[in-house]
Image (cartoon, rainbow, N blue to C red):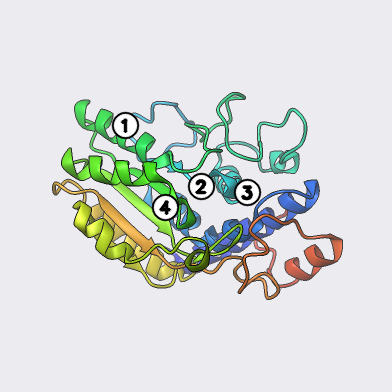
Amino acid sequence: MADIAQLKKTATQIRRDILRQVHSCASGHPGGSLGCADFFTALYFDVMDHNPAFNMKGTNEDVFFLSNGHISPVFYSTLARSGYFPVAELATFRKLNSRLQGHPATHEGLPGIRVASGSLGQGISVAIGVALAKKMNGDPKTVFVLTGDGELQEGQIWEAAMFAPHNKVDNLIVTVDYNGRQIDGDTKDVLSLGDLEGKWKTFGWEVLHIEDGNDMEEIVNVLHKAKSMTGNGKPIAILMKTEMGYPIDFMVGTHKWHGAAPNDEQLARALAQLEETLEDY
């Protein structure tokens, strides 16, 4: 059984890493990264069967694809804290010649990154390809992918959503970060997403919910449930409600921290709300 208290501590440290990465280069996307820290922690430190030694093909292990690549700070911190590369390398985020580019890329060979994800809408399609390859090769492991809710405004998402059930891609779990905000405002104002549960179900997916995507125990339980449901003929979609900027008091409740970096004073204020649980790089 997962040590929820330890997972919470790890998520807190990942949030500290996120803030410091974005502050150090005065650029990046802290809002969604902070909101998804609990999900990444649960996935990499409890749910997925993965190997930090890293092989690009991901044979005989669970693999993860980040479709909404702009939340790279949370992905990089999670990979580093999981042992994929030294934690000290987080200090190079978005710096010249760094392997930690603003959006994940494969060119520099950063362990843990299997596909570039700067352009939105492509991650589920990539994940379907890998999931099909696993089925063809008799590999029993699971493919996970995270997408943003604003990203669901991309047409390619729904092409993939039709393809996966039709082809019984039942080793695939798609999680939607359903925070209701995107770079220009609330999703309901920019382009309403409508009945997401109904849409996924109509396309032929099993649909689960994480009502509080910042509740570690709920995330762990639902992800394990989803994994137990694989192999039954249908792909699985999880609608996960998170709070952008969580839990920093001046970052929640707004879309303004989607792509803005904290200044020195704001960084200090934010870090004061997060206990240092491991050690900062």
Query: Which element carries disc 4, helix, strand or loop?
Result: helix
Real-space CA distance between mark 2 and mark 1, rounded to the nearest whole angstrom: 18 Å
Q: Position of residue 5 (x, y in %)?
A: 50, 69
Name the residue that disc number 1 marks: 129
Give the structural element (helix, strand or loop) at label 2: loop
- Spatial separation of the CA atoms under disc 1 and disc 3: 26 Å
Front of the two marks 1 and 3: 1
Give the spatial CA distance, label 3 vs label 4. 21 Å
Mark 2, residue position: 68
Q: Residue type at mark 4: give it.
A: Leu
Front-lying residue, 28 or 143 = 28
User: For the residue labelled by badge 1, is the local secondary structure a helix, a strand or a loop?
Assistant: helix
In the depicted structure, whether residue 194 falls above or below residue 73: below
Say which label, 3 or 2, has the lower sequence index. Answer: 2
Q: Which residue is mark 3?
A: 73
Badge 3 amino acid: Pro
Residue marked by disc 4: 152
Is residue 172 found left or right of 217 in the rendered image? left
- Element type at mark 3: helix
